[in-house]
Image (cartoon, helix red, strand yellow):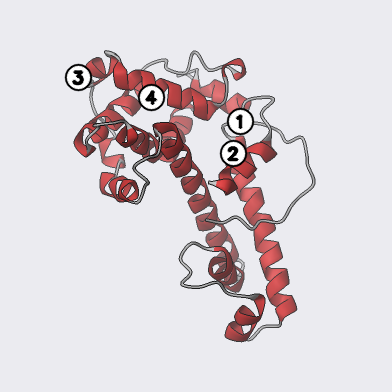
Amino acid sequence: MVTTMVQEPREFPETHWSQLLELQNPAHPRHAEHLERLVGQYWKPAYLYLRAIRAMSAEDAEDLTQQFFAMLLSRRAFDRLSPDRGSFRGFLKTALRRFAVSADRKNAAREPRDGAHLFRFEEAEALWKEQDRGLSPETAFDREWARSVITEAMRRLRQEFTAQGKEIYYRLFEQYCGETLGAEVSYDDLAKQHRLSVDDVRNYLRVIRERGRVLIKDMLRDYLFPGEDLEDELRFILSR
């Protein structure tokens, strides 16, 4: 996981509380767009949360994941959203926990399951098999949420730097900071491999790290309540 981002000055960023409020209003023109983004970002954490519940089978977790998001999509589930009730991530975990033990899931099972094709459960189950079986549902959720944010940030970095003709920046970053290294590499190693100076390697990595932090912050702002600290959320993401 990417953990070597450079430090930036603290700031008071604009949060996207207005976007969360739009989730409460089905008539808002961007309501469906926000719901789609929310489902895409949180369905795998939800699945791993459910799998971490004792005796929850893969089949049951698949069904409940589909039912949970069907419920979110079809009801006014966000009416209770409030910055006084904790983080948005905490709100979803609480809703998921209550859903897993309540009669709501029985009603949701009878609702249309449009969108079930969005979920590639074989991917989520593969992630589950890599998890420590002693993880709590909350930790399983948070780790997968953090992984998904970083994975999306990496995808955007690659897309941006490739489009700018700077794919070497991403290749260096992936080798130096990525998860799939066979062994640790140094700036000297990278400089020799790519026929660059050590200063070039250092500068390229600094640039892409800074951009990576910006991209992660942009994604985190989407679901921050007023008063939540963006830097705290960033540290949380990078510590998973």
Determine whether 68 is above or below 48 in the image: above
Q: CA distance from mark 4 to mark 3?
A: 18 Å
Question: x%, y% of residue 143?
Answer: 47, 43
Q: Residue tagged by mark 2?
A: 220
Residue type marked 1: Leu
1 and 2 marks in contact (CB < 8 Å): yes
Q: Earlier in the sequence, mark 4 or mark 3?
A: 4
* Residue type beneath disc 4: Leu
The image quadrant that residue 5 belongs to is bottom right
The residue closer to the viewer here, 40 or 129, is 129
Residue 224: assigned label: 1
**Residue receiving disc 3:** 110
Q: Amino acid at mark 2?
A: Leu
Work out how far the residue at label 3 is from the one at label 1, CA to CA, in angstroms.
33 Å
Mark 4–mark 1 CB contact (< 8 Å):
no
- Where residue 193 sits in the image (x, y, percent)? 58, 84
Mark 2 vs 3, N-terminal side? 3
Q: Earlier in the sequence, mark 4 or mark 1?
A: 4
Is residue 74 visible in the rendered image? The answer is no
> Does residue 97 appear to the left or right of 122 in the view shown?
right
